[in-house]
Amino acid sequence: MNGSSDSDPDVRYSFLTTNYEKADVLERSVPTILAALPENGELIVVDGGSTDGSVSILRTLARSDDRLRIVEARSNLGEGRQIAFERARGNVLVQHVDTDRAYEPAVAKLLSVFAHLEGEYDDLVLCTLDSLYISRAAPIRRVGGWPPLGRVEERLFVERLCRSGATLRALPIRLSRELPTADAASPGARARKWRLTARDLRRVGFSLRTLVRYDHRRFPLPKALVADLCCVLGAYDARRAGEIETVPGAPRGPAVVESWQDVLRYEPDFFPDGEATVLSPADLSTQVPETAWVDLRFGDPGQGWESAGLDGSA
């Protein structure tokens, strides 16, 4: 069962991503995604209403590679990811690919690892530290897909997977690097992103007091005061948008699979440095106590989970 009822026997893999105002990096990011995509695959890019020429660039790229499919639909991040999921024709989905990141060809190795492991675990979702998720469609459908959030959509997505009993296997590797983009280069652009982040954190239940306290732990005072204003505006936006319903204290289902040792049976050179620092996705929760906010980055960049958009950088 794939993401869409419109299946295509010639398409086995669907790489799914969204785009908004990333015209300045598309010609560097999209070719790296296509380079990692098998010939019997497709790359679906959902553009959420860009006005910077993104769609024109994507169409030019598509003319030289018919595996690239472009969907234009005014949408936020979570909505766009769900649209891509519903349009997917492949049986194996690689989700949360981003158009502001450059990917290593080794992403293709994840597909062989997934093929080896999915016979051992029902509802397997293989994930990396740079937030790639490889799975069949069934476990994604079971949790209701991607939440319609403009920021922090990944956080709630993982929370849903943990509660559903899906088998999450986290690999302590990153196979991409971020490409600086103009839409996040100016103070105004960063403020808009933090306002959106604050809005959606309020929508999933975080208090304004918690957001403000986080600002003052993370930033020097002048920057914290600007962030506070963004939080207040985001809280106003959240009242207009309505809450996203969550289930506090809901059971997470079977224990999350953390060990990655079995992977070495199939790809002995997959982890060149042999490091084994893994954080369970079950540690992600919409009910984070205030005292935990200082640890939202989950350790050093080379060791733990990235902030998954909580700082507005994703």
Image: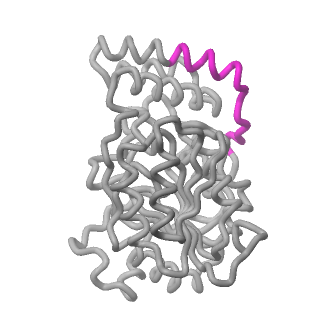
Which sits in the foreground, 311 or 246?
A: 311
Where residue 164 appears, as percent x and y from the top left, is 69, 59
Quarter of the figure with the N terminus: bottom right
From this view, report whether residue 276 is shown above or below residue 151.
Answer: below
Residue at 38% from the left image edge and 63% from the top image edge: 31
In which quadrant of the rendered view does residue 285 lie? top right
Image height of 299 relative to 112, above or below: above
Expressed as whole percent of the image width and height from the top left, the position of residue 256 reads 55, 64
Can residue 208 be found in the magenta stretch?
A: no
**Residue 244 forms part of the magenta stretch:** yes
Q: Residue furthest left?
A: 273
The figure's colour scheme reads: one colour
- Viewer can see residue 277: yes
Q: Quadrant of residue 5?
A: bottom right
**Where is residue 240, by image quadrant?**
top right
Please state the total of marks drawn on the protein image: 0
Visible residue check, residue 257: no
User: Is 71 displayed left or right of 308 in the figure?
Assistant: right
Q: Position of residue 49 (x, y in %)?
A: 59, 39
Which residue is nearer to you in this view: 14 or 52? 52
Apparent side of residue 186 relative to residue 204 in the rendered image (left or right): left
Could you say where residue 85 lies in the image, as x and y percent from the top left? 65, 60
| Highlighted range, magenta | 231-249
* Residue at image location 42% in from the left, 82% down from the top: 262
The correct choice, above or below, for 263 with respect to 221 in the image is below
Q: Please state, as top left, top right, bottom left or bottom right, where the C terminus lies in the image.
A: top left
Name the residue rendered at 69%, 62% in the picture. 87
* Residue under the point 41% across and 26% down: 189
